[in-house]
Image (cartoon, helix red, strand yellow):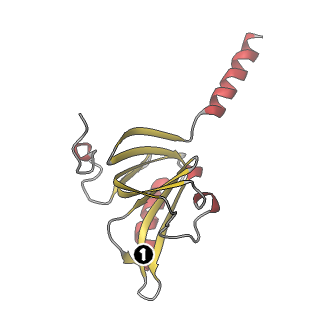
C-alpha cells in the first residue's frame, strides 16, 4: 500500500513540474531553461528582396513568449545553412535548452519578427518579451553570439551582476 501511495505522489509531482526554470533574472538579464517542446528557433526573414534574416529563439512560458534575438542581420542562406544548423546540433537529442539574454523590451502589441513557420502556440501569448541573445546551452555544449560568451567569467553577458 505504501508503494502505491508513493507512486501516485511521484506521478502527480512529476506532472506539476514546470517546463521552465529560471536560474537567474534581473531587470536586464535572464538565464532560463526550457523543455524542448516549448522551444523553437528560426531565421526570421527581415527582407525577402534583399535576402536578409535575423536568428531568433522562442521560448513559451504559459502566457508569455520570450524571443531571444541575434544582434545583427545576416544573409538568409548563411543564417539557415550555418547558424541554424550549428544550433540544431546543440539541441538535437536534448530535452532541456538553456538561454541567456539581456536588455529586454516588452511588447504590449505582439510584434513578432517572424510569424511563419513559427508554430501556433508561440503566436498567441498575452505578453511578449524580446531579449538580446547571449548564449544557448544544452548537455551537448554551449554556443554564444560572441566567441567568449560561454566562458564562466562572461555569465552576465557584459552586465554587472545585481548585489
Which of the pair 110/35 is nearer the observer?
Answer: 110
Residue 31: give x, y in percent of width and height.
38, 44
> Outermost residue toward the top?
2
Asked if 23 appears above or below 80 in the picture, the reply is above
- Tell me where residue 13 sits by quadrant: top right
Residue at the (23%, 51%) spot, across then down:
158
Residue at the (58%, 58%) spot, across then down:
122
Residue 91: give x, y in percent of width and height.
49, 54
User: In the displayed structure, does residue 149 sit left or right of residue 11?
Assistant: left
Q: Which residue is mark 1?
A: 53
Residue at the (61%, 63%) spot, across then down:
119
Residue at the (58%, 72%) spot, across then down:
116
Which of the pair 1/103 is nearer the observer?
Answer: 103
Residue 125: give x, y in percent of width and height.
57, 55
Which image quadrant: the C terminus? Answer: top left
Residue 68: give x, y in percent of width and height.
42, 58
Which of the pair 1/40 is nearer the observer?
Answer: 40
Amino acid at each position: 500500500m505504501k508503494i502505491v501511495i508513493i507512486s501516485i505522489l511521484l506521478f502527480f509531482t512529476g506532472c506539476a513540474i514546470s517546463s521552465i526554470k529560471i536560474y537567474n533574472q534581473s531587470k536586464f538579464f535572464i538565464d532560463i531553461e526550457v523543455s524542448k517542446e516549448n522551444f523553437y528557433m528560426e531565421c526570421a526573414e527581415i527582407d525577402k528582396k534583399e535576402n536578409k534574416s535575423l536568428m531568433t529563439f522562442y521560448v513559451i512560458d504559459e502566457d508569455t513568449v520570450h524571443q531571444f534575438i541575434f544582434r545583427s542581420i545576416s544573409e538568409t542562406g548563411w543564417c539557415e545553412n550555418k547558424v541554424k544548423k550549428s544550433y540544431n546540433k546543440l539541441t538535437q537529442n536534448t530535452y532541456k535548452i538553456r538561454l541567456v539574454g539581456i536588455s529586454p523590451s516588452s511588447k504590449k502589441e505582439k510584434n513578432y519578427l517572424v510569424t511563419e513557420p513559427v508554430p501556433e502556440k508561440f503566436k498567441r501569448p498575452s505578453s511578449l518579451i524580446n531579449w538580446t541573445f547571449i548564449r544557448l546551452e544544452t548537455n551537448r555544449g554551449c554556443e554564444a553570439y560572441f566567441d567568449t560568451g560561454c566562458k564562466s567569467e562572461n555569465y552576465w553577458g557584459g552586465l554587472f551582476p545585481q548585489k
